[in-house]
Amino acid sequence: MIIQPTSVAALTWIGAAAGASSEGWRIGAVLSARPIGISEEGLMVLQVGAVTVEAEAPGTKLPPQFQVRVLSVGAQPQLEILGASPLESTITQALRSRLPQQNGYAPMLATVGALSQWSVAKQLPPYVRSALALLEHSMSTPQELATPEGLRQAINRSGLFLEAQLAQAPASDATTAHDDMKSAMLRLVAILKGQPAPTESSDAEVDPPLLYRGAVPQGRWPLPPDLANSTEATDFLPRLNTDVLAALARLEVAQLQATPAHWTVEVPVQDEDGADVLQLLLKHQEEAEQDWTMGFSLDLPALGPISGELHLRGLRLSVRLWAQQRETVDLLENQFETLRARVDATGLFLDQLSCQHGLPQAGSSVSAVFLKATV
């Protein structure tokens, strides 16, 4: 959960966040906590030690009394809920093992793109080329994402639902998840076994982008100089192993944090000149059956970083867009009339349609295991 200070406790909270409070805000300290109500904005009000804070409602119900451990201090203290259920403890352990390893898809896509060049690919063993081809086949194309059915299929094969699909499929169906992104990465990891593993993480704080931030545009990743000019396939394999393991850990973080009311999915999109990442963030207000919010982000070479948020409440739709480049704002606004007509044709009422120059501040998301505090 992202915690914001209440107005009545702002000064106390600032002192605590700075580590100057006498109430025990030190790394490793265990504090008592309890929910004390709901604010006018619909946020949960919590008493943590001597500090009152507001937070988004977690994915699971909090007990009347619980404890938290201070994991980090400073401008954004991070707290861990103690005394969780066995299932939550298992999830916590899994998150701890994957968070230091995780990274976005962009480095992996850059390495795969470099290996797809014929001068390098022809040096690879056939089974490695086959695994790389399967990984590329699991990616979507811009044409597929332009249709509702294509987008639905892209989300289904993003890897987020792999285990659920396997559990529901008949044992005799060998084609289940054959084009799933996680399945393709697992196959590639098995083939690359024996390559140097990622280096052990340091004690530095790791920022987990899928847990506590909204949909953040992710641009293409350049190859390091030592690989950019290499034509030897063996030079790429250790890097490929590291990148695939990091992307797989990121996907598993998203799976561990997914709930029926909140999930994040990343879809690699293969174009003629490279691959980009479409990130989708879906939230459902459980108190209101017909209240959905979908965020998205992407960073295209020709348009730059773009983010958007669609809020659907019943039949009323609000659309907000952001673009980092002024020229992209103009291009999007030129499409507003077409978009309004398409929304009207669906029977929805378009309450808001806007595009702002710049990108929104990192949004908050829900975590049932960790509390991340901000001032």
Image (tube, grey):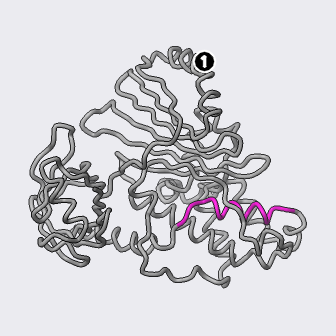
Give the structural element (helix, strand or loop) at label 1: helix
Q: Residue placed at 13% from the left, 55% from the top?
A: 52
Number of marks in the image? 1
The residue indicated by pointer 1 is 338
- Direction from residue 102 to residue 118 in the image, left or right: right
Residue 149, relative to residue 101: is it above or below? Answer: above
Instruction: Inspect the magenta stretch and tell me whether residue 99 lies in it.
Output: no
Type of amino acid under label 1: Thr
Q: Position of residue 44 (x, y in %)?
A: 18, 48
Circle 1 Cα neighbour tier, 10 Å, few/some/many (<14 / 14–19 / ≥20):
few
Q: Residue placed at 43% from the left, 43% from the top?
A: 282
Q: Is 90 or 305 nearer to us in this picture?
A: 305
Q: Is 170 or 102 nearer to us in this picture?
A: 102
Q: Position of residue 295 (x, y in %)?
A: 46, 40
Q: Quadrant of residue 116?
A: bottom right
Q: Residue placed at 56% from the left, 15% from the top?
A: 341
Which of the image's four quarters has the N terminus?
Answer: bottom left
- Direction from residue 66 to residue 28 in the image, left or right: right
Q: Position of residue 107 (x, y in %)?
A: 65, 64
Which of the image's four quarters has the C terminus?
Answer: bottom left
Instruction: Inspect the magenta stretch and tell me whether residue 110 lies in it.
Output: yes
Residue 321, relative to residue 2: is it above or below? Answer: above
Q: Is 78 or 88 nearer to us in this picture?
A: 78
The magenta stretch spans which residues?
A: 103-117
Q: Position of residue 78 (x, y in %)?
A: 30, 66
Q: Quadrant of residue 325?
A: top right
Q: Main secondary structure of the magenta part?
A: helix
